[in-house]
């Protein structure tokens, strides 16, 4: 009997991803990255996080599929499934497959703690291109539960079974700086990508590093294999020193957030604007926000904002400041 089409494994090549990015670089109206909340529920309760609760139901599958359809209509390149903890959504492999079959590149942001071999294999077959995990310390502390103590068994599973890209992000400042250096060494020893992010203040702006943390950060940056060249985080160096940045943020155009209610926001720190329904979000909205400089950009530490805007560095911005 012929295998159903939907059950066949999907594989997204890096060549296909690079081709999609090239087309987006030419076409200014295409979003590079859309992050979409699939559930606000989380299995952790980290002190610095405000993006979760313990009671919300997952966003229904049919609703999420309609939002994915809207992103396809906008010709979005990457679609990242967010939470809360997105792996708690009972249909997460089906969502990944739906994104891949729609011609977009599926990604997941997760703490990784609910990963099991069976789920990893399902995500492989569904066409997941990459998963970003969070790890901020060697052991749990009063600020974070995203520890290597919890994550390491999952890294073992991923090394054995995952066919997708694995990237681990750590927030420097949520634990002892020396611990972050050890986390980076452990992650890169697995052959996975490691990204070190900066702690944000209540306003979403980067906090400068202490002398001790700055020394550790410099050591982390020396680790071979930490980040591919095209994903470099050089923008963080001035921020770590407390200096401003001069760059063109394309939030609302090249990248944006979709909350559990289906509203579009510029980014996590700018939740609340424009707060427009995704199904009503058009190329006109993309063009407007593409041209608008952002007043918060000088101290912005959001890596995906910098990466999503990077292909437009040479292009001007002529709109009113948001």
Image (cartoon, grey):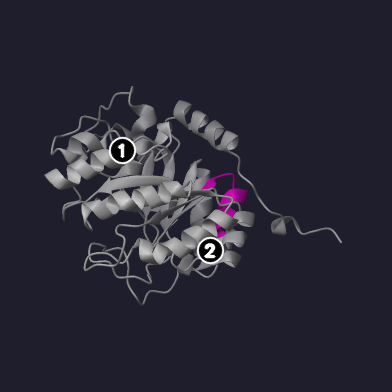
Regarding mark 2 in the picture, which secondary structure is present there? helix
Secondary structure under tag 1 reads helix
**Residue picked out by circle 2:** 92
Residue at point 36% right, 31% down? Answer: 310
Q: Which residues are magenta?
A: 94-105
The reply to whether residue 287 is visible in this rendering is no
Quick check: 238 above or below 184?
A: above
Residue 237 in percent (x, y) is at 22, 35
Quarter of the image that includes the C terminus: top left
Is residue 294 positioned above or below 87 on the image?
A: above
Picture coordinates of residue 154 (x, y %)? 48, 62
Which of 117/77 is in front?
A: 117
Report the mark closest to the observer, 2 or 1.
Answer: 1
Residue furthest toward the top?
A: 314
Q: Quadrant of the N terminus?
A: bottom right
Give whichever of discs 2 and 1 has the lower sequence position.
2
Q: Is residue 77 above or below residue 55?
A: above
Task: State which quadrant residue 250 falls in.
Answer: top left
Q: Is residue 307 magenta?
A: no
Q: Whole-percent x and y of residue 192?
A: 46, 47
For label 1, count other residues whose C-alpha is less than 10 Å away and answer few (under 14), some (14-19) or many (20+).
some
What main secondary structure does the magenta stretch of the protein show? helix
Q: Nearer the viewer, residue 74 or 12?
A: 12
- State the residue at coordinates (36%, 39%): 223
Disc 2 and disc 1 in contact, CB within 8 angstroms:
no
* Residue drawn at 29 percent across, 49 percent down: 181
Q: Which residue is mark 1?
A: 221
Residue at point 19%, 41% (across, down): 215
Q: CA distance from mark 2 to mark 1?
A: 34 Å
Q: Residues within 10 Å of mark 2 (few under 14, many from 20)?
A: many
Residue 93 appears left or right of 144: right
The answer to whether residue 191 is visible is: yes
């Amino acid at each position: 009997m012929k295998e159903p089409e939907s059950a066949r494994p999907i594989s997204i090549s890096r060549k296909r991803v690079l081709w999609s990015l090239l087309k987006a670089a030419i076409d200014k109206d295409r979003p590079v990255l859309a992050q979409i909340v699939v559930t606000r529920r989380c299995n952790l309760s980290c002190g610095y996080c405000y993006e979760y609760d313990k009671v919300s139901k997952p966003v229904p599958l049919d609703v999420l599929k309609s939002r994915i359809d809207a992103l396809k209509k906008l010709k979005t390149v990457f679609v990242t499934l967010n939470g809360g903890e997105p792996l708690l959504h009972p249909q997460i492999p089906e969502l990944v497959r739906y994104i891949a079959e729609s011609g977009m590149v599926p990604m997941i942001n997760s703490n990784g703690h609910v990963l099991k071999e069976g789920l990893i294999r399902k995500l492989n077959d569904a066409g997941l291109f990459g998963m970003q995990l969070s790890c901020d310390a060697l052991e749990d502390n009063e600020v974070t539960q995203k520890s290597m103590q919890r994550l390491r068994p999952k890294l073992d599973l991923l090394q054995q079974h995952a066919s997708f890209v694995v990237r681990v992000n750590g927030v420097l400042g949520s634990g002892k700086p020396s611990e972050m250096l050890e986390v980076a060494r452990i992650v890169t020893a697995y052959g996975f990508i490691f990204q070190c992010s900066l702690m944000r203040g209540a306003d979403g702006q980067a906090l400068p590093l202490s002398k001790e943390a700055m020394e550790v950060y410099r050591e982390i940056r020396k680790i071979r294999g930490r980040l591919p060249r095209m994903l470099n985080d050089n923008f963080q160096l001035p921020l770590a020193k407390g200096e401003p940045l001069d760059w063109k943020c394309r939030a609302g155009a090249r990248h944006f957030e979709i909350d559990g209610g289906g509203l579009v926001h510029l980014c996590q720190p700018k939740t609340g604007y424009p707060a427009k329904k995704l199904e009503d979000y058009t190329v006109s909205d993309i063009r407007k926000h593409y041209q608008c400089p952002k007043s918060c950009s000088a101290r912005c530490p959001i890596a995906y904002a910098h990466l999503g805007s990077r292909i437009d560095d040479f292009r001007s911005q002529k709109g009113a400041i948001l």
